[in-house]
Image: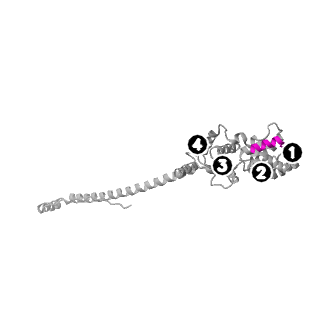
Amino acid sequence: MSKKLKFNTIATSRFSQSDSKNNESLLTTTSKYFNTTNDSSKKTERKRRVHVKIKSEEIEDTSHSIDSEIKYEESQHVAVKEEETQVGDKWMPSNWETILENIKEMRKHQTAPVDEMGCHKCADPKASAKVIRYQSLLALMLSSQTKDQVTHAAMQRLNTYGCTPETIMGTPDDVLGKLIYPVGFWKTKVKYIKKTSQILIDKYDGDIPKTLKELQQLPGVGPKMAHICMQVAWGEISGIGVDTHVHRICNRLEWVKKPTKTPEETRMTLEEWLPKDLWSNINYLLVGFGQEICLPRFPKCEECLNKDICNFSKKDRARKKA
């Protein structure tokens, strides 16, 4: 920064010739004192110049100090922003607790299809514990790419017909197909159900496996089904069941560090930061939320309690206004 310093013009007294002569005589007689005065005048002039220089240096230092303060404040702002999404070495999304509490509030009346027709509601409550576990597994196998209403209706027909591994193995494929139709990919699921039922009879005495690894080795059983089955059938929390609803919502809420392409990728990311004591209920909460509010198409952002803190909602409203 260029600085211009203004110096005041020092005015000097003009003497007449007579005064000059008198002064000369005075200087001759009292030169000691006048010499001192002249020195003092010179010193005074030097002080003024030094004073001006000091003032200039102070201005430069002040501007430098201001710049430093701005940089310091900016660095503090960045540090605070990082702190919002970083707890120790673990990444966590901002506002996730507030968002989750709002979802719980929106789900408190339990009016979503999953509340009454989810896989945990499909087994015959009058059946034995072993049969209930088998029916829960079948309900999960049928639920893939299928709405809860359709899955629940298919399971009611199977339960009425007779839903045990032995009964299913004695049922012709075409009859089994009619019982589960119109679930998604029903022809493929008929084959999976038959193969799985035979394995359960041969290896597990008609019961289902007790481990996540063995469940995933059954035909047509993926990670989501296995994790939910462990919870519903055995009461164990082995992981988070991530279906299309949970996958979609986690990406919209930015609950993943970067956008994920598959439900399994979302599950692994979600399990890295979500406290484990919340795993058991998160699928149930998000699925119902996705069925009623955060729909795949035309989400009801205006009705959502998170509309002011959800970036997806903000973008959606901006798009509608455009």
Horizontal and vertical percent for residue 163?
83, 43
Instruction: Quote the CA–CA distance across marks 4 and 1.
Output: 47 Å
Q: Mark 1 points at which residue?
A: 167
Mark 2 and mark 4 in contact (Cβ < 8 Å)?
no
**Residue 105 visible to an observer of this rendering:** yes
Q: Which of marks 3 and 1 is nearer the N terminus?
A: 1
Left or right: 51 as drawn, with respect to 303:
left
Q: Under tag 2, what secondary structure?
A: helix
Crowd rating for badge 4 (residues with CA inside 10 Å; few <14, some 14–19, many 20+): few
Q: Under tag 4, what secondary structure?
A: helix
Mark 3 and mark 4 in contact (Cβ < 8 Å)?
no
Amino acid type, mark 2: Trp
**Residue 220 visible to an observer of this rendering:** no
Examine the residues drawn in magenta and state their main secondary structure.
helix
Q: Under tag 3, what secondary structure?
A: helix
Crowd rating for badge 2 (residues with CA inside 10 Å; few <14, some 14–19, many 20+): some
Q: Nearer the viewer, mark 3 or mark 2?
A: 2
Instruction: Quote the CA–CA distance across marks 3 and 1.
Output: 44 Å
Q: What stretch is highlighted in magenta?
A: 151-168
